[in-house]
Image: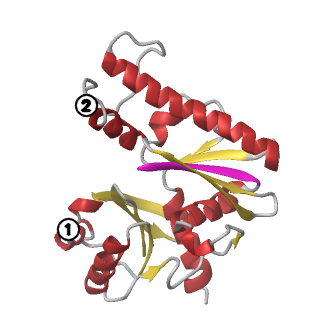
Amino acid sequence: MLLAVDIGNTNMTFGLFRGKQLFRRFDIPTKGYSRRKLKNLLKKAAVEGSIVCSVVPAATRVLARDLSVLTGSRPYIIGKDIRVPIKNIYRNPKKLGQDRLVNAYAAVRLYGAPAIVVDCGTVVTLDVVSRNKEYLGGMILPGLGISLDALYERTALLPKVKLTYPGKLISRDTKSCILSGLVYGLAASIDGLSRRIKEKIGRRALVIVTGGNMRLVSKYCSCIAKTDPDLTLKGSNFIYKKQIKNS
C-alpha cells in the first residue's frame, strides 16, 4: 500500500493507494499537524512506501522524520529524491513548485494534452501543458481565503466573512457583496484566462480544476471540462509506480 502526501500551506492531504485505486483520503491542517494525529489516522494501514509532494519545506522535514518512524522507511520527496517525468521549460525550473509539475503530469496521464490545470488552493495557479506534453508555465493569483483576509485586514469597515457559496450576482448587503465579488470574480478570471491561453496553445485544450476550493469556484465557471480533487495525489502515485516500484 502506498501513502501519497500533498503538503499545502493550509492542509496536508494524505491518500492511501492500492495500485491505481485511491481508497482512503484524509486531511490534517498543516499548522495543526502532529505525529500522534498521523499515527491515529494510519492505524491498521500496511504502508509499504510513501511519497511526498510539498510546498512547505519545514513541514516536509517534520513529516519525513515521522513517516520514517511510523512506516519503517524513508519517504521519497518529489523534487529532491525523485523528479517529475515531464519536460519543463520554466525559466528557472528550481523555482517552480513541485505540486504544479505533479498536477501537469497527472493531467496529461489522465486527460491528455494540451491542458490547462487550475488549482484552487491557498493560492490559485493556472498551469499550461502543450500538445507535445511540455510544461510551459502559467499564472499565480491570490486564493479566496487570502482575498477575504486582505479585505478585512486592510479596510476599516468591511467585516470578516466566512467563505461559502455566494447568493445573487448583484448582492444587496455587504457580506453578500464580498462573496459575490470574490467567487464570481475568480470564476470570471479563470474563464477569461483559460480562453486567452487556449488562443495560444489550441482551443481543444481541456481545463481541469483541482484544489480545496474547487467545487466552490467551478460551479460558476463555464470553461471547465474536468474536476478532480485528487489530482496531486494521483500524480504522485503515478510517479512512484513509474520510477520507484518498477525500477
State the residue position of label 2.
160
Residue 228 visible in this rendered orientation of the protein: no
Q: Horizontal and vertical percent for residue 146?
A: 37, 43
Residue type (three-letter) at the residue carrying disc 1: Asn
- 63 left or right, relative to 147: left
Identify the disc placed on residue 40.
1
Residue lying at 80% horizontally and 47% vertically, measured from the top left: 200
Instruction: Name the image colouring.
Output: secondary structure
User: Quarter-wise, where is residue 163 in the image?
Assistant: top left
- 152 left or right, relative to 85: left
- 73 left or right, relative to 83: left
**Marker count (numbered):** 2
Q: Horizontal and vertical percent for residue 191?
A: 64, 34
Image quadrant holding the C terminus, namely bottom right
Is-magenta flag for residue 181? no
- The magenta-colored residue range is 114-125
Predominant SS along the magenta part: strand
